[in-house]
Image (cartoon, grey):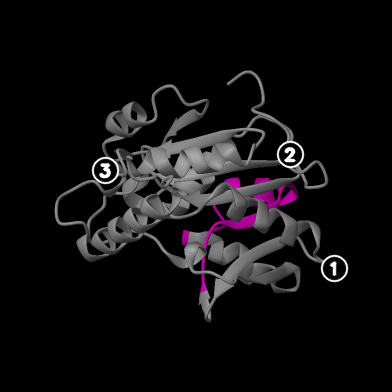
């Protein structure tokens, strides 16, 4: 993308860019690629990226690897950039580094997002940005719910060079461990930050939740006279 997507929906929030990790092999999904599984009429990865786009980042870089062409096809028409990671089999840390290195637009905050967190909404990403903006100190925000650490992790763009150098591992845990005084824990009132889709059982549960959400949001129809 040569042009930025937009400023954040709330002008008081810091400008952010996002890296979406979509390179994994879905090894626990029983032979299916979890990011291509359908959810409410679209591939899972497209649902995730559409929600992120609605939060109006400066740019989104989607890191591809396993079945990269299919993932790119599932996102056809969306204003995102793609960064292939030939080292994706070495672990998520290589995708984090590749994605952050591919960011081009100026921003204050970087979100490292999981492509299979299909329940996250634009409001959730903005919630995390508000937590970042409200920090009394520090430069890293980690969402937590019921004692479980979640994703995305939000960190100051000043850490980008460190991340690109590969000094992180899955979930930016090394970055967090190396800078404990800079970490702010955001206690979330919902489980969307801690819910992803790794197994067929996860997929079944998420399908049921999405169906309930779709049913609840559908306009009611008055009976015909």
Which residue is at the front of the view, 207 or 184? Answer: 207
Distance Cα–Cα, label 2 vs label 3: 33 Å
Quadrant placement of the C terminus:
top left
Q: Is residue 131 left or right of residue 218?
A: right
Dot 1, how many residues are within 10 Å of its Cα: few (below 14), some (14-19), or many (20+)?
Answer: few
Q: Nearer the viewer, residue 202 or 25?
A: 202
Near mark 2 (Cα within 10 A), the count class, few <14, some 14-19 or many ≥20, is some
Residue 28 belongs to the span the image colors magenta: no
- Of callouts 1 and 3, which one flags the residue occurring earlier in the amino acid sequence? 3
Q: Residue furthest left?
A: 31
Q: Quadrant of residue 2?
A: top right
Dot 1 falls on a residue whose secondary structure is: loop
Residue that numbered label 3 is attached to: 38
Vertical placement of 74 versus 48: above or below? above
Q: Which residue is mark 2?
A: 107
Q: Which residues are magenta?
A: 149-170
Q: Dividing the image into 4 quarters, which one contains the N terminus?
A: top right
Sequence-wise first label, 2 or 1: 2
Q: Counting residues from the N terminus, which is met first, the one under dot 2 or under dot 3?
A: 3
Q: State the residue lying farthest toward the top.
A: 2
Q: Residue at x 26, y 36 (%)?
A: 67
Residue at screen point 54% across, 58% down: 168
Q: Is residue 91 visible?
A: no
Which disc number belongs to residue 136? 1
């Amino acid at each position: 993308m040569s042009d930025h997507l937009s400023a954040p929906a709330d002008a008081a929030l810091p400008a952010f860019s996002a890296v979406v990790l979509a390179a994994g092999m879905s090894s626990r999904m029983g032979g299916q690629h979890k990011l291509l599984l359908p959810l409410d009429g679209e591939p899972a990865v497209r649902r995730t990226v559409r929600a992120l786009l609605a939060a109006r980042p400066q740019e989104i870089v989607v890191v591809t690897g396993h079945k990269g062409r299919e993932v790119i096809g599932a996102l056809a028409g969306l204003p995102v950039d793609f960064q292939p990671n030939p080292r994706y089999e070495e672990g998520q840390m290589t995708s984090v580094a590749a994605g952050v290195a591919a960011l081009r637009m100026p921003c204050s905050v970087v979100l490292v997002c999981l492509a299979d967190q299909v329940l996250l909404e634009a409001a959730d990403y903005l919630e995390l940005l508000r937590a970042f903006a409200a920090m009394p100190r520090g430069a890293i925000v980690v969402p937590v719910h019921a004692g479980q650490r979640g994703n995305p992790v939000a960190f100051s763009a000043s850490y980008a060079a460190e991340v690109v150098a590969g000094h992180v591992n899955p979930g930016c845990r090394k970055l967090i461990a190396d800078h404990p005084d800079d970490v702010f824990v955001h206690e979330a009132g919902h489980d969307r930050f801690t819910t992803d889709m790794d197994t067929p059982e996860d997929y079944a549960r998420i399908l049921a939740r999405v169906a309930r959400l779709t049913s609840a949001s559908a306009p009611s129809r008055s009976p015909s006279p």
